[in-house]
Amino acid sequence: MGDFMDNTIQYVSGVGETRAKLLRSELGITTIRDMLWYFPFRYIDRTKVYNIGEIGESLGAAYVQFRGRVTGTSFAGAGRKRRFTVYVSDKTGSAELVWFQGVKWIEKSIEVGREYLVFGKPSFFRGELSIIHPEIESVEKALNRKMPGGLQGIYSTTEKLSGAVGTKGIYNIICNLWTLVQDKIDETLPPEVMHRYGLIPLKEALRNIHFPQTPEKLRQAQYRLKFDELLGVQLNIQSQRTQRMSRQNGFVFTKVGDKFNSFYNNRLPFPLTGAQKRVVREIRNDTVSGYQMNRLLQGDVGSGKTIVALLSMLLAADNGFQACMMAPTEILARQHFATISRMVEGLDIKVSILTGSSKARERRHALESAADGSADILIGTHALIEERVVFSNLGFVVIDEQHRFGVEQRARMWTKNEQPPHILVMTATPIPRTLAMTLYGDLDVSVIDELPPGRQPIRTVHYYDSARLRLYGFMREQIALGRQVYVVYPLIKESESMDYKDLTDGFEAITRDFPLPQYRVTACHGKMKPEDKEDAMREFKEGLAHIMVATSVIEVGVDVPNATVMVIESAERFGLAQLHQLRGRVGRGGGQSYCILMSGEKLSKEARQRLDAMCETTDGFRLAELDLKLRGAGDIHGTMQSGSAFDLKIANPTLDVQILQTTQQAAMELLEADPNLSHPSHAGLQKLKERYSGKERSDFSMIS
């Protein structure tokens, strides 16, 4: 778009040094481009002018605009409670305009007998129309001013910014900015792409996103700008995939040897499901292809991803390579270490562990065994990325619950070998397949969509708070059978702004109703010291506590087969994906498990749909599809969240799936014809690609 767009916003009329600093600190806006790409979050119709008599409580309009002549003014109150009231009327009725702030300025600008155009949010007191702090200007001035568009954008702001600028101030800055930039906007897309996909020019899109002439023009502008953002993302994703697949630099695992076969034939805790076998074949095919594997493994909670990961790491060991597995928490890493060590006991497999709290002896053993090659598998937390962790011949990396790691943490793992190791990233967060294939287009996607044999579906029920005595009775029955119970709260402490159950009060209530010595209750939440949190989870895992009261910190974590009841308080507060993750903490053993969703009596339509869906199915992928329909992103983590990966301003990958799929196809075709986008007509595409390169993808680009 040229260097002009990189100029500071400070010198645009209406900004200045002070506002420029605020825009930078509060909204991250520093350049003209930043300001131009700061879009309204909603719009109000300024084309409709009502008669005062038409504006009643039944109108239901959020904002109204009318013409009225000032018939008088008055003051009331004193100090901070002082208010200024302007009385206006037309031939159909009358209204009051009230100001509590800026009274001196408003008083000077109002003239009794003059007609004004009034805009604001209507309220009614004893049936009379009243508008607090309306926008107001004389009819003469309004008629002489050429309105930029029929709909006026409303821009989000912050509390700190609203005093100095506010949404109206941002709108005025945009108006001033437009006169400077409208002739300096370069097109990013070649004509054939615009024609093929029915896109309006970029200049027209930017004008109509800020100053829509009509609702249809606004729709066209939104589509074009979303298309640009998602095309920029897909150009990066598809380019990285193309580069990776063009290089035969992957380790080749030529054989399936004794380690794999001994475990597969003699040590499998249960027969593999068809889905697990399919994924193992996919990984096997990757590791003999000569290309470096970069695979995302999705598996619902309890679907058996760990067995697949272990089999894959045994393949590496059979071919003389080391493998490592990185987990997001110490307790999960130690859980993996204990499980895998037990499974391979007696086989010629050496397993080590390294975490942030490893004692000196354990740490020394882990570092030495990784460096001299004696460790076939090293399991750990983010401690694995430390510089002093050196591998002899790392060939396979597993990242468990990959969304819990930062970009730089994952990227450093990929560089633990001169030649890139094969990468398997795993997640238990269900992502609809079509969305995963497009948003994670640079990864190959595998799905485990069957539960291991013997696992019983979790029974899920919804109770209102009035059924609490019934709930407590059921909890006592389960504890009497030797089972354990989770009780999860959305908040740690009571909130004035949210009427939800909180852990602090809940813990007190449960310890009162489940007293010692018969019952032992422990607590776990994110504000606890890490060592205290680990101790609480370990106490529950070892069966020393009957009830764990927690926040969603246990969403991903300890595996307690003896825990058969998950109680989720204020369940309406959670998204579907998070509810499903929490439910997955039970049902880990062979016995029947239960998930009880507690809520208040008053539920929104959407909340009721979520709770009903949880009761109807335990299929995480069905729930993920429903989550998309209900509210887009839901609780899908990490790079799935709109804007977090690529600084998207208007597109939402989870809501705009159709545009995402269209841009994926467009990117593939463009790169097939011009892999480096070096053709002169693709200069704008190259800039688009650079703009949406996204830090979140640096981990994958490093291994391509």
Image: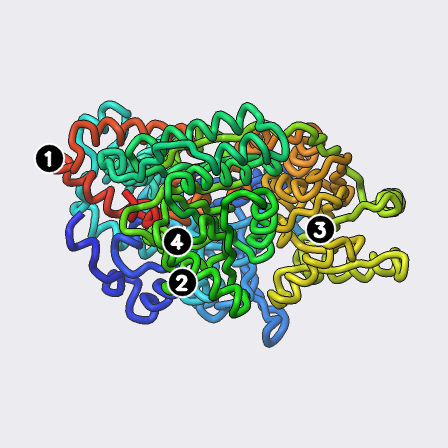
- The one nearer the camera, 569 or 137, is 569
Mark 4 Cα shell of 10 Å, populated few (<14), some (14-19), many (≥20): some
Vertical position of residue 500 compared to residue 269: above or below: below
Q: Earlier in the sequence, mark 2 or mark 4?
A: 4
Q: Using the image, determine if residue 464 lies above or below residue 111.
A: above
Q: Is residue 522 left or right of residue 350?
A: right
Residues under numbered marks 1 and 2 in contact, where contact means CB atoms less than 8 Å apart: no
> How far is the residue under mark 2 from the one under mark 4?
18 Å
Which image quadrant is residue 678 in?
top left
Of labels 4 and 3, the one closer to you: 4
Percent x, y for residue 634? 54, 41
Q: Secondary structure at mark 4?
A: loop
Q: CA distance from mark 1 to mark 4?
A: 49 Å
For residue 679, the mark is 1
The answer to whether residue 624 is left or right of residue 499 is left
Real-space CA distance between mark 1 and mark 3, rounded to the nearest whole angstrom: 57 Å
Q: Is residue 580 left or right of residue 356?
A: right
| Distance between the alpha carbons at the discs numbered 3 and 2 | 34 Å
The label shown at residue 386 is 2
Q: Residue type at mark 4?
A: Gly
